[in-house]
């Protein structure tokens, strides 16, 4: 799953964009007080960092080596709370 596919699936579930941040491309324009995905350059490859940022500090940080794994994780986190 790509960021665009994840965003589309979250829209289908009617999950508000202000509850997630997807590397500044989709969702909220900032990552404060929401689940977030940031893409960054790692030592040997691109890393996908998923975290919850509260009061300016990252909590529950998980790092993935594929976009698909990171997107699947966020999808599971957000869809489990959707009705």
Image (spheres, helix red, strand yellow):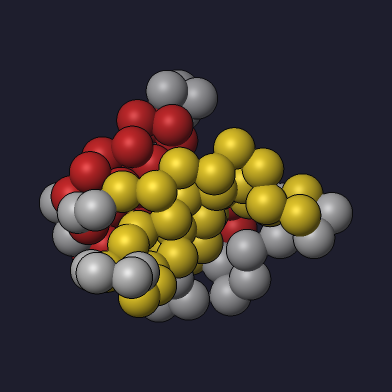
Q: Quadrant of residue 78?
A: top left
In this picture, is 24 found above or below 9? below
Q: Quadrant of residue 8?
A: bottom left
Question: Which residue is located at x 24 percent, y 69 percent?
Answer: 44
Number of marks present in the image shown: 0
Q: Quadrant of residue 32?
A: bottom right
In this rendered view, identify the residue nearer to me: 62 or 43: 43
In this picture, is 40 found above or below 13? below
- Compared across the picture, whether 53 is left or right of 68 comes to right
Q: Position of residue 20 (x, y in %)?
A: 52, 54
Q: Is residue 14 visible?
A: no
- Compared across the picture, whether 14 is left or right of 20 comes to left
In this rendered view, identify the residue nearer to me: 23 or 28: 23
Question: Which residue is located at x 46 percent, y 50 percent?
Answer: 50
Q: Position of residue 22 (x, y in %)?
A: 43, 64
Q: Is residue 62 visible?
A: yes
Q: Position of residue 15 (x, y in %)?
A: 46, 44
- Compared across the picture, whether 2 is left or right of 13 comes to left
Question: Which residue is located at x 24 percent, y 53 percent?
Answer: 65
In this rendered view, identify the residue nearer to me: 21 or 49: 49
In this picture, is 49 found above or below 60? below
- Compared across the picture, whether 82 is left or right of 10 comes to right
Which quarter shows the C terminus? top left
Instruction: Kindly give the residue lying farthest to the right in the view shown.
Output: 55
Q: Position of residue 79 (x, y in %)?
A: 39, 31
Question: Which residue is located at x 33 percent, y 37 percent?
Answer: 73
């Amino acid at each position: 799953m790509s960021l665009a596919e994840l965003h589309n699936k979250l829209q289908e579930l009617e999950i508000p964009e202000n509850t997630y941040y997807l590397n500044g491309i989709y969702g909220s324009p900032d990552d404060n007080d929401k689940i977030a995905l940031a893409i960054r350059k790692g030592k040997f490859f691109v890393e996908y960092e998923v975290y919850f940022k509260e009061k300016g500090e990252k909590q529950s940080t998980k790092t993935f080596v594929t976009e698909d794994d990171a997107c699947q994780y966020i999808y599971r986190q957000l869809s489990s709370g959707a009705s």
